[in-house]
Image (spheres, grey):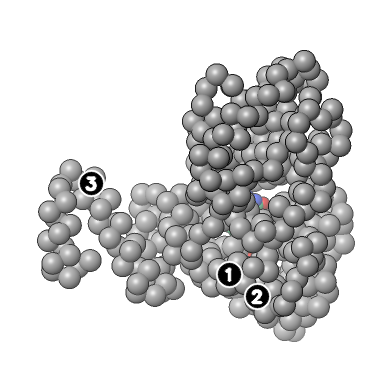
Amino acid sequence: MTIGIGGAGSKIAAKLDNGAVLVNVSETELNKVPGGGRRILASVHAARGQFKGSRMNPEIGHDAYQSIRRELLDMARGDMVFSSTGGGTGNGITTGILNDLTKANDIATADKTSFGLILPYAKLESSEFVNNTIEFLTEPLAAAIDSGNTGNIFLFSNKKKFEEKVSEEHYNQQLVESLRMFLAIPEKNDKYRLLDGHIDHEDFALFMSKPYFNHFTYFDYDPKKPFGDQLDASSNPYLLEPEAAIEALFLLEVPKGGDPTLFYDILQYFASKDVSPIYSVVENPDRQKPLVTVSLLYSRKPAELVDDFNRISEGHAQAKVKKSLDQWVELEKMEVNLEKEARRAVKQRGEGEEVLATLRRLGKL
Ligand SMILES: Nc1nc2c(ncn2[C@@H]2O[C@H](COP(=O)(O)OP(=O)(O)OP(=O)(O)O)[C@@H](O)[C@H]2O)c(=O)[nH]1
Ligand SMILES: [Mg+2]
């Protein structure tokens, strides 16, 4: 089952799963979402009906979480939850879920909840969205991951949507299709002739239950070129860029009669990174060229996470993100950020390292 919370979360969950449970504090918003299954209206203390959203205020969402807490926690077991991090409803309610997971003991593998989070594109989106996101990443999300009680976290980005001016509907469709490629791995193992390795539903569920960030991608694999170069050039544009992988999984689909030994080079690449992936190789008669679907699990500390978010924002948005950091992140983390900012500025102006040294001496860094 899939759960969609707030505007973005509901629209994306409903596209992925016709039986998705959709949650909002606004009846109007709930009724507008096409597809999906059951609707749950979380109650805020409104005098006359609930037709408004949380107006970008996560406190309202968090408040409303109390009214659906038990039901939602129950449903979220072994499930995938979608939400944006910028608005009030999705952020507030998902914060509630994450805080409760952080406090829980011994969540079984099969009961872990994975999260699909939609991050704003700070360069063009409002600073409320940016502030809410930074608070969400550094506090409830970081704590929940540290507790080891979540499953995979997928950090979707709206960068491509804004840069390429894609309609919301179309973008959601592309994002969901991309996610489907990854989620289809166990079914493809059932459906196609297995040539080597094996990823069954249990293996896949175990992988999904690990408390790391998941960056998955897929591309036509050219066995004559180094796998690593192709992987680096093919990161998924709907997700934040990955960091060094801790664990990995891949499915290689080769055409009919294709070479079933191509995967050894991929294994070797991962071995050079000290990663032993789980994998499988199948024969897909519909393919003309080998296709590989890869997933990397990686870990980030809160400050680094904000930095990743910062990196996709670019240009003048840096200032906006930094202003928000002043509010939310302790001094130590900010210093790291200032140093980076200074480095970037110095490089841009073509000045040398000595400027940095001077700034440091003056106590500006
Ligand atoms: N990709 C994508 N992003 C969306 C969509 N709808 C909203 N967003 C993004 O999500 C953020 C806003 O969050 P919403 O999900 O609309 O907010 P909410 O959780 O409903 O909270 P409130 O509206 O404040 O009550 C912004 O970054 C938007 O760009 C969508 O359908 N697709
Ligand atoms: Mg909304």
| Amino acid at pointer 1 | Asp
Q: Residue at x 30, y 56 (%)?
A: 340
| Residue underneath mark 3 | 347
Q: Residue at x 76, y 31 (%)?
A: 196
Image location of residue 22, percent across then percent down: 79, 62
Image location of residue 102, percent across then percent down: 65, 75
For the residues labelled 1 and 3, the Cα–Cα distance comes to 35 Å
Image location of residue 237, percent across then percent down: 56, 40
For the residues labelled 2 and 1, the Cα–Cα distance comes to 8 Å
The reply to whether discs 2 and 1 touch (Cβ–Cβ < 8 Å) is: yes
Which of 332 and 21 lies nearest the eye of the viewer?
Answer: 332
Any part of residue 162 in sight: no
Relative to residue 280, is residue 2 depicted above or below?
Answer: below
Ligand 1 rendered quadrant: bottom right
Relative to residue 169, is residue 62 depicted above or below?
Answer: below
| Disc number lying in front (3 or 2) | 2
Q: Secondary structure at mark 3?
A: helix
For the residues labelled 3 and 2, the Cα–Cα distance comes to 41 Å
Which of 195 and 131 lies nearest the eye of the viewer?
Answer: 195
Q: Residue at x 79, y 24 (%)?
A: 284
As drawn, the label of residue 102 is: 2
Q: Is the N terminus in the top left, top right, bottom left or bottom right quadrant?
A: bottom right
As drawn, the label of residue 146 is: 1
Any part of residue 107 in sight: yes
| Disc number lying in front (1 or 3) | 1
Identify the image quadrant of residue 211: bottom right
As drawn, the label of residue 14 is: none
| Amino acid at pointer 2 | Thr
Relative to residue 104, is residue 108 depicted above or below?
Answer: above
| Amino acid at pointer 3 | Lys
